[in-house]
């Protein structure tokens, strides 16, 4: 029986078969996808909600990415993260290798992982990594607030394998952040729920507005993208008039301190220099004034109560909070940058650079052809300047 247009479309929608135009279609596969658009290689041209239909694959790819990161293989790490990001954007689960044809960013390693998972329900390379002593140690160490891959590697090379060994090693000098990381490890290694983030928003909002009633506060990071859980709560704070933000953050910190809820605070003054071009290095921290906090959140402040560890009878838990203070004329770029996801923003920058000859970072959008900064008052302005369709925050979970 001949394949009808309808049934062919049905195959396409289900399997995401997208052949490049040069490939001659076989009788059962249609080459002109109607229901599913071509998937872009740039995350900023895809819409990615929190609903991930391909978690089985993306979890495996994340382990491979992380392991590559520990081995300082940046290229491989990025390749796995890009592949995972493409799979996250698909509207349903990949059920056959054929369904990945024509998708961008899927290299042969990724294809092999997908094939193995489709066939065996697991990936042996991933399991091997997860059993690896070095991977386990580095994963454990980097789960501590203030410990990056470099420090973790240093500790591993010393022969250290557990928290106990690190804390008992007299030669190791923990910095203030790492000490807080260990002190509050049980709390801050646990996820933060949406209700807990909301409670923190109320606390920060009240504090900020007590100091400056017309200050602008925005919840950013994963919670702005609609995530149910996060590892911290991120906020942007600014003022309607340029310059009035100076001194505000220190005041907020003092006030939190007075309330007795500040468990840890690292404040970084601004190093912002308006004459500097946007940076090409995504991983570089932006120059805005900010603070990394650990805040005490009480049971009765959270709708539905706190998430608790078993056997924990305290009436509070510790939560990681980031407050970032861009001057108001940088608010839109800062908001876009701090809303993330990392992969989404990384690709916005790559798209700007490669497709538009523009430089974009948390501070500014610069047109290299026109040799000028483009004015950006809202996130929408940035998408317009880049010639991109607007992507809502909840669609940026790339
Ligand atoms: N970001 C940034 N510069 C940094 C750190 C982060 O621009 N130096 C951006 C990237 C994503 C966003 O801020 C929030 O960062 P995270 O809190 O690390 O990520 P998240 O998406 O909020 O994820 P999580 O739910 O784990 O907090
Ligand atoms: Mg966050």
Image (cartoon, helix red, strand yellow):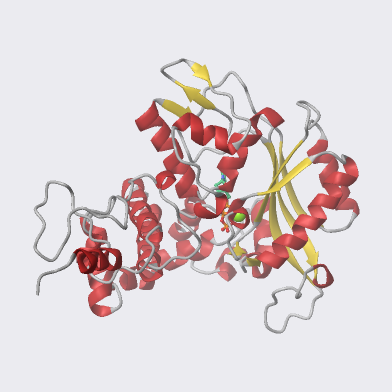
Q: Residue drawn 46% across and 47% down?
A: 344
Q: Residue at x 78, y 81 (%)?
A: 313
**Residue furthest out toward the top:** 371
Nearest to the observer: residue 389 or residue 296: 389
- Choose top left, top right, bottom left or bottom right for residue 208: top right
Residue 55 image point, x, y percent:
41, 68
**23 w.r.t. 27: above or below:** above
Hey, which quadrant is residue 167 in on the image? bottom right
Q: Can residue 95 be seen in this view?
A: yes
Q: In this view, does 116 lie above or below 227?
A: below
Q: What x and y, as percent, mark residue 217?
A: 75, 45
Total marks drawn? 0
Whether residue 100 sits left or right of residue 169 in the image: it is: left
| 300, 54: nearer the viewer | 54
308 in relation to 382, above or below: below
| Residue 327 appears in view | no
- Give the percent coordinates (x, y) of residue 71: 36, 53
Side of 245 where 375 appears, left or right: left
Residue 278 relative to residue 101: left or right: right
The quadrant of the picture occupied by the N terminus is: bottom left
Residue ID at (50%, 36%): 383
Q: In this view, does 63 lie above or below 254?
A: below
Relative image position of residue 303 (x, y in whole percent): 77, 71
């Amino acid at each position: 029986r001949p394949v009808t247009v309808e049934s062919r479309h049905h195959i396409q929608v289900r399997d995401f078969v997208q052949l490049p135009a040069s490939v001659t279609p076989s009788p059962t596969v249609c080459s002109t996808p109607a229901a599913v658009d071509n998937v872009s290689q740039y995350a900023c041209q895809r819409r990615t909600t929190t609903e991930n239909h391909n978690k089985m694959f993306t979890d495996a790819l994340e382990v491979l990415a992380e392991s590559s990161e520990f081995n300082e293989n940046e290229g491989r790490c990025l390749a796995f993260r890009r592949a995972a990001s493409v799979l996250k954007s698909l509207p349903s689960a990949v059920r056959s290798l054929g369904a990945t044809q024509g998708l961008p960013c899927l290299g042969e390693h990724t294809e092999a992982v997908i094939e193995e998972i489709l066939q065996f329900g697991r990936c042996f390379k991933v399991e091997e990594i997860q059993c690896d002593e070095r991977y386990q140690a580095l994963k454990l160490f980097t789960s501590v607030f203030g410990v990056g891959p470099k420090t973790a590697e240093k500790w591993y090379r010393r022969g250290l394998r557990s928290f106990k060994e690190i804390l008992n090693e007299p030669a190791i000098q923990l910095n203030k952040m790492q000490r807080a990381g260990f002190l509050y490890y049980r709390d801050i290694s646990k996820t933060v729920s949406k209700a807990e983030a909301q409670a923190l928003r109320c606390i920060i909002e009240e504090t900020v507005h007590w100091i400056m009633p017309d200050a602008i506060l925005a919840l950013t990071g994963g919670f702005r993208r609609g995530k149910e859980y996060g590892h911290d709560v991120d906020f942007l704070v600014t003022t309607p008039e340029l310059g009035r933000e100076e001194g505000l953050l220190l005041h907020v910190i003092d006030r939190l301190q007075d309330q007795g809820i500040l468990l840890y605070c690292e404040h970084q003054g601004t190093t912002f220099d308006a004459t500097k071009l946007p940076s090409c290095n995504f991983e570089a921290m932006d120059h805005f004034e900010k603070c990394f906090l650990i805040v005490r959140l009480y049971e009765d402040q959270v709708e539905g109560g706190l998430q608790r560890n078993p056997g924990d009878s305290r009436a509070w838990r510790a939560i990681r909070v980031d407050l970032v203070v861009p001057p108001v004329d940088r608010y839109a770029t800062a908001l876009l940058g701090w809303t993330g996801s990392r992969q989404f923003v990384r690709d916005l920058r790559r798209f700007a650079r490669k497709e538009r000859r523009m430089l974009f970072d948390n501070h500014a959008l610069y047109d290299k052809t026109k040799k000028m900064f483009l004015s950006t008052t809202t996130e929408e302005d940035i998408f317009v300047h880049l010639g991109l369709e607007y992507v809502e925050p909840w669609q940026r979970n790339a």
